Amino acid sequence: MNLDPTPSFPTLSGEIFDSLPESIRSYIRYLEATIQQQQIQIQQQQVRIQQLEVRVHELEALLSKDSSNSSKPPGSDGLKKKTKSQRGKSGKKPGAQQGHAGKSLAQISNPDLIVTHTPTNCHGCGSNLGQVDGTCAETRQVFDIPQPKIEVTEHQALEKRCPCCGELNRGVFPENIRGPVQYGERVQALAAYFAYEQITHGLCNAHHLRELTFIHEQEKEDWAKQMKDLLIFAKNEVERHLEKGALPQEILLRIEETYGQIIAEGFAYHSLLPPLPKGKRGRQKQRDGKNLLDRLRDKRSCVLRFMYDFSVAFTNNLGEQDIRMIKLKQKISGCFRILRGGQIFCRIRGYISTARKQGWNIWDALAEAIRGCPRLLAVHQETALQAIAV
C-alpha cells in the first residue's frame, strides 16, 4: 500500500480530456481541486506537527530537570523525585580515609600588618611589666579582605580666556568620562566577568556535570557522557597529585587531546540534526547540547583551569554554601525588618562558616560564643567583647 501523502497521478492528454463528456470533465476538475487543497492542508499539518513535537520535547526536558542534572535548587525537586549524586560508589567508608592529610591555610613570612599583644602585669605577683622586653611566643595570622570604600572622583573642566584674542577655551574631559555621573572602571570590573581580559576565570564544573548528565540521559547524546567521565577523571588526577603541586605533562596532554576529540564528536553529531523551527524574531534557537558545546569550546581554558592551577577549585560549591543559608532565610522570611537584623544574621552565619572551615566543633564554638569567649583568630579581648556587644 502506498502511504505517500503526495502520490503522482496519471495525466490525460488534451485530446482524450476533450473527448470526455462534460460531466466527467467537471468531476475530474473537482477531484483535482480537492486533491490540491488536501495537499496544502497536509503540508500545513506537517509543519504544525513538527512544531508540536519540538514543544513536547521541550516540556518533557523541562519536567525531567532537577537538582541532579541542572542548576535547579534541591527544594524544587518535589517529594516524588529522588536526587542523584554525581559521586560514584568507591567502596570506601564515609568520612576521611586513613592517613588523610588535613587542609588549612598556611602562615606567610611577610604579613601586611603586625599586631602585638603584650601582658601588662605579672599573673603571679601582679608586678608591672611595662618596661620589660618581651619575645614572641606564638603567632597567629588572619587572612581577610579590606572593607571596600566608595571613592568619588570629580572631574572639572576649567575655562580660560585668552588674554590676546579673548577666545574662551574649555578643558576636554578624558574619553572614558562620558556623563555627569558614572561608575568607574574598578566597579565595572566587578560586574563584567568575561568582558575583561586582564584577569583569569575558572568555571564551576559541578554545573557542567549536571548539564552533561541531563543531555546524556534526556537527549541521548553519547558525547556528553564521555565529557562527564573526562572531567571526573581530571578531578581525580588533580587530587592524586596535590602534594606535587602539578599534573605530569603526559596526563595534561592526554586530557587536552581527549577534550578536543569529544568536542569535535559533539559538533559532528549536531551537524546531522535538523535545525529547530525558527521563531518569528530573534536568533536561531539551538538545542541545549549545542549551547553547552559552544561554551565548552569557547571557554576551554576556564573549564580546565583547575588542572593547571591547583588553587582553583573544581567547583564553586564552597562559595555557594556560604550564601545558601542567606537565600534560605530570604525564602522563608522574605526580608529583615531593619538593616540591623540582617547584619546580626550575617555575623552569626559568618561565625558558623569560619568554625566549619577551621575544623572546629560547631556546637562547642557556639557555646563558647554564648559564654562570651568566641573563637576569634588573632583578635585581642577588647575587640572580641566589642563584637559580642554589637
Image (tube, rainbow, N blue to C red):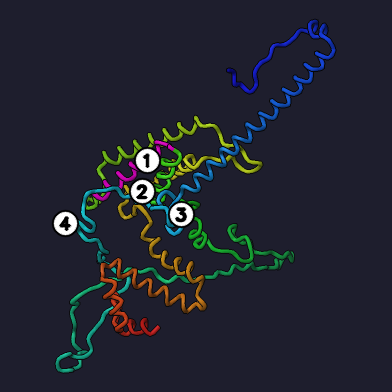
Of callouts 2 and 4, the N-terminal one: 4
Q: Secondary structure at mark 1?
A: helix
Mark 4: amino acid:
Gln
Mark 3: amino acid:
Lys
User: Where residue 164 appears, x then y in whole percent?
Assistant: 72, 65
Q: Main secondary structure of the magenta part?
A: helix
Please name the residue that numbered disc 2 is placed on.
Answer: 305
User: Where residue 161 appears, x then y in whole percent?
Assistant: 70, 68
Q: Secondary structure at mark 4?
A: loop
Q: State left or right for residue 276 relative to residue 241.
A: right
- Crowding near pointer 2: few (<14 within 10 Å), some, many (20+)? some
Please name the residue that numbered disc 4 is placed on.
Answer: 98
Q: Nearer the viewer, residue 30 or 105?
A: 30
Instruction: Classify residue 278 by image quadrant.
Output: top right
Q: Please state which of the two labelled residues, at mark 2 or mark 4, is closer to the viewer.
A: 4
- Crowding near pointer 4: few (<14 within 10 Å), some, many (20+)? few
Where 365 sits versus 74, above or below? below
Residue sitting farthest toward the left? 124
Contact between labelled residues 4 and 1, with CB atoms less than 8 Å apart: no
Mark 1: amino acid:
Met
**Where, quadrant-wise, is the C terminus in this rendering?**
bottom left
Measured Cα–Cα span from mark 1 to mark 4 = 31 Å
* Residue 175 image label: none
Q: Please state which of the two labelled residues, at mark 3 or mark 2, is closer to the viewer.
A: 3
Measured Cα–Cα span from mark 4 to mark 3 = 35 Å
Of callouts 3 and 2, the N-terminal one: 3
Of callouts 1 and 2, the N-terminal one: 1
- Crowding near pointer 3: few (<14 within 10 Å), some, many (20+)? few
Measured Cα–Cα span from mark 2 to mark 4 = 29 Å
Please name the residue that numbered disc 3 is placed on.
Answer: 72
Please name the residue that numbered disc 1 is placed on.
Answer: 227
Q: Please state which of the two labelled residues, at mark 4 or mark 3, is closer to the viewer.
A: 3
